[in-house]
Image: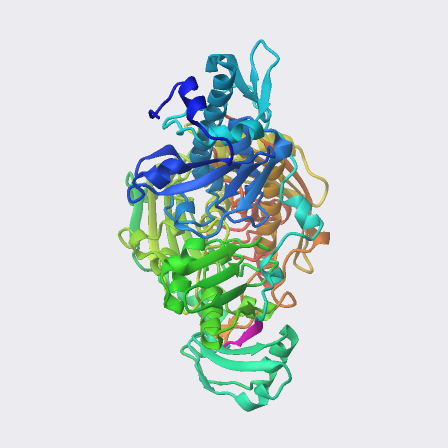
């Protein structure tokens, strides 16, 4: 058979049976479609194949999803992309979560992982190409069977039909023959035009199994002969186990083994209750720890002290120092954000079974590639012997990019020789996480005599995320995530100077929803309001004046202001605040309306209006849901959340002392999606950054108090209110 046979040759030589399976191979700068058959017979050492689409004779189109579904709706979105390009019958589309394999790596990241709102952005091209190849092959088969030109056929809702005729065949009827075709190396993507699936509000594919309880989360995994494990961990950073009462634990019915692991002492039992009873009887004596005097107060002081240091310059335009020196009015403010927990609904867990020649892992993870690498290190097996099966995730927010809980489960299983289901308690989860880095930002601004901004100096003190997980991503001592949101600001800021100062503390830090955009958005958008106040200008107009060269940011901000009734007086006792931010390719603007109980220091959020321009819209319902969820997430962080450190360790232990927003406190949320022709932007993270500054600016509008330290509750808010009253209602532009 020739590489591209004619229809007669194809039909004469093909055998019936089987299904249609497509793959694509990745090269450094391109994506080529190949058939699974070609991959087997070709040169696998040159290609990095990945199978995305399976069509079977029952007319089911299955999309293999290489991303983790943690509530963000990505499994449905990726399936919609395939279904649109393929012209499938949506009612016959399914998805499967890919196991951890080299071939399922994200082509942009070079790893199988989920984060930074990249799933659609990174996968849209390979998925469209794979679907386009499938469509062309199905059309080619049908045209050959009818002995007509392919130009006289089209794919339509799960069938190939003859144009200007009455013949049609389903994908299922065609897939066996189509599987014998070589895939076109450069399939033609559909041209822009009317879309049937993309852009419509389809029901998410993961909702039915979650409603009928058939969805499997990490805590639902069960394998034969497993033991439940829990780990007693130190309360202070750097503390080591000095002694523990093994005999007292092993006498408890159901307890099978006590195992020392890197993170503490594990109790393995026939039931979870027995494991927890064992941990209570273990009576571990710990060393004092490496930093016994460490506390929230000492940490904050260390951040503030570092502000006097000279940092690494990450962006410099014009002459900021000279412009500040010549400014008619100078404004300075310091903003501080605390460490935060991820507080996922489902605490960390992992089921692992280490055998002589293989290791099976069932885990809710955002990072299959690193889970495989971790298991290989701990088991002593080759990566090819590691099987990672990703369950649904009960929340991720970046916490499940870490693999510490995979390491622990594999260590225990290797020692016991049995399957191990490691389950963290909420207290373990809260006190042994990788936290959103605390950050301190000092900003200096200069205004000319007409109230125009002429200088902006921005200094960031924050730990590094990348220094631990990927040191090669540190460029010139700068962590890109720490400066995100200011080095790529959408504003035209003349005489701009940005510095980064890395601070290392014993508190472990990790990726948290939207990363450094949270602290930079809070600082930038709060400072914008302070500058506008000093310039005697409306906060909206002040911002719009610096967005003339960025029409998308300008339009989103203008749109949300109009929808929120900006310029019209709010109800008595309320204030409105506005903020915007560009995060992971998307433009988001928000207006918050609040009232403040000035005696109790309590902020009540009445309404948040949000506008988003994320370019290419896949599922508007998912976008709206993610914006609502991100706003609630951001409100909780701004109003309540703070990891407390004392005596050298984290002392926040549960939702009784790490407070989060409750359902009764959720305000009215109004989301508007602005459709543009831009490339796909991120969604799952992008609503979070503007929330805190919009809220802080609304508090100022309502009370005259500037809140520069988060969370804005209790002493922080009451202190800001006291300072505002002493100064006649308006907080002066100085460091608190």
Residue at 56% over, 50% down: 70
Magenta residue span = 227-233
Along the viewing direction, whichever of 475 and 15 lies nearer the viewer: 15
- Depth check, front residue: 501 or 170: 170
- The chosen color scheme is rainbow
On screen, 50 above or below 598?
Answer: above
- Up/down of 722 relative to 449, above or below: below
Could you say where residue 693 lies in the image, as x and y percent from the top left? 54, 47
Instruction: Please tell me how many numbered marks the rendered image carries.
Output: 0
Name the spot of residue 473 as percent of width and height, x first: 32, 52
Q: Is residue 82 above or below residue 347?
A: above
Rendered view: 615 above or below 304: above
- Residue 305 position in % (x across, y down): 38, 64
Q: Which image quadrant: the N terminus? A: top left
Q: Position of residue 168 (x, y in %)?
A: 59, 19
Residue 736 visible in the shown view: no
Judged by its main secondary structure, the magenta piece is: strand
Magenta run includes residue 389: no
Q: Is residue 262 left or right of residue 175?
A: left
- Would residue 140 be seen by someone viewing this image from the given angle? yes
Instruction: Spot the residue most to the top.
Output: 164
Pick the residue in front: 549 or 105: 105
Question: Which picture quadrant has residue 242?
Answer: bottom left
- Outermost residue on the left side: it is 476
Q: In the drawing, does residue 219 fall left or right of residue 149?
A: right
């Amino acid at each position: 058979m020739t590489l591209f046979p004619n229809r007669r040759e194809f039909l004469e030589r093909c055998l019936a049976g089987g299904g249609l399976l497509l793959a694509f191979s990745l090269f450094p700068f391109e994506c080529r479609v190949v058939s699974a058959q070609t991959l087997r017979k070709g040169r696998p050492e040159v290609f990095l194949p990945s199978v995305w689409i399976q069509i079977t004779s029952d007319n089911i189109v299955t999309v293999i999803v290489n991303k983790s579904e943690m509530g963000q709706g990505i499994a449905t979105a990726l399936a919609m992309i395939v279904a649109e390009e393929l012209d499938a019958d949506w009612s016959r589309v399914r998805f499967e979560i890919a196991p951890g394999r080299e071939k399922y790596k994200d082509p942009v990241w070079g790893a199988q992982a989920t984060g930074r709102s990249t799933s659609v952005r990174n996968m849209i091209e390979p998925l469209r190409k794979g679907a386009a190849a499938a469509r062309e092959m199905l059309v080619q088969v049908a045209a050959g069977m009818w002995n007509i030109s392919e130009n006289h056929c089209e794919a339509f809702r799960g069938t190939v039909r003859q144009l200007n005729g009455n013949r049609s065949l389903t994908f299922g009827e065609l897939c066996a023959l189509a599987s014998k075709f070589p895939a076109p190396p450069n399939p033609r993507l559909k041209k822009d035009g009317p879309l049937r699936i993309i852009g419509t509000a389809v029901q998410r594919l993961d909702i039915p199994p979650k409603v009928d309880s058939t969805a499997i989360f990490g805590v639902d995994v069960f394998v034969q002969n497993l033991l439940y494990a829990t780990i007693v961990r130190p309360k202070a950073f750097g503390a080591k186990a000095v002694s523990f009462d093994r005999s007292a634990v092993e006498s408890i019915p159901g307890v099978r083994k006590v195992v020392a692991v890197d993170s503490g002492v594990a109790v393995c039992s026939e039931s979870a209750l027995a494991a927890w009873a064992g941990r209570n009887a273990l009576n571990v004596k710990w060393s004092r720890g490496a930093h016994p005097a460490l506390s929230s107060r000492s940490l904050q002081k260390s951040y503030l002290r570092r502000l006097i240091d000279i940092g690494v310059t990450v962006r410099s335009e014009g002459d900021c120092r000279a412009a500040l020196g010549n400014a008619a009015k100078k404004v300075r403010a310091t903003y501080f954000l605390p460490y935060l927990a991820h507080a996922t609904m489902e605490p960390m867990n992992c089921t692992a079974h280490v055998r002589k020649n293989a290791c099976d892992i069932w885990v809710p993870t955002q990072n299959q590639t690193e889970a495989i690498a971790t298991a290989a290190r701990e088991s002593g097996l080759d990566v090819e012997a590691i099987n990672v099966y990703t369950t649904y995730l009960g929340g991720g927010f970046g916490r499940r990019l870490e693999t510490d809980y995979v390491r622990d489960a594999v260590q225990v299983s290797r020692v016991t020789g049995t399957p191990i289901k490691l389950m963290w308690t909420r207290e373990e989860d809260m006190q042994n996480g990788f936290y959103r880095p605390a950050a301190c930002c000092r900003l200096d601004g200069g205004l000319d005599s007409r109230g125009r901004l002429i200088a902006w100096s921005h200094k960031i003190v924050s730990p590094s995320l990348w220094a631990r997980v990927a040191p090669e991503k540190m460029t010139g001592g700068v962590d890109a995530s720490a400066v995100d949101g200011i080095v790529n600001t959408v504003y035209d800021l003349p005489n701009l100077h940005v510095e980064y100062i890395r601070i290392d503390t014993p508190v472990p830090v990790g990726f948290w929803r939207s990363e450094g955009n949270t602290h930079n958005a809070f600082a930038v958008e709060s400072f914008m309001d302070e500058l506008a106040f000093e310039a005697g200008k409306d906060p909206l107009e002040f911002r719009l004046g610096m967005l003339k060269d960025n029409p998308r940011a300008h339009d989103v901000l203008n749109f949300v202001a109009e929808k929120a009734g900006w310029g019209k007086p709010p109800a008595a006792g309320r204030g409105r605040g506005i903020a915007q931010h560009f995060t992971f390719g998307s433009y988001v603007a928000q207006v918050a309306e609040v009232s403040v109980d000035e005696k109790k220091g309590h902020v009540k959020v009445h309404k948040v209006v949000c506008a988003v321009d994320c370019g290419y819209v896949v599922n508007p319902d998912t976008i709206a849901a993610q914006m609502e969820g991100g706003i609630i997430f951001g409100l909780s962080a701004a109003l309540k959340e703070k990891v407390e450190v004392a005596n050298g360790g984290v002392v926040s232990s549960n939702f009784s002392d790490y407070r989060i927003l409750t359902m009764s406190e959720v305000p009215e949320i109004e989301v508007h999606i602005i459709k543009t022709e831009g490339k796909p932007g991120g969604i799952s993270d992008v609503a979070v950054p503007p929330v805190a500054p919009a809220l802080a600016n609304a508090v100022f509008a309502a009370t005259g108090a500037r809140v520069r330290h988060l969370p804005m509750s209790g002493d922080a808010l009451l202190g800001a209110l006291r300072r505002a009253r002493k100064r006649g209602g308006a907080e002066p532009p100085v460091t608190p």
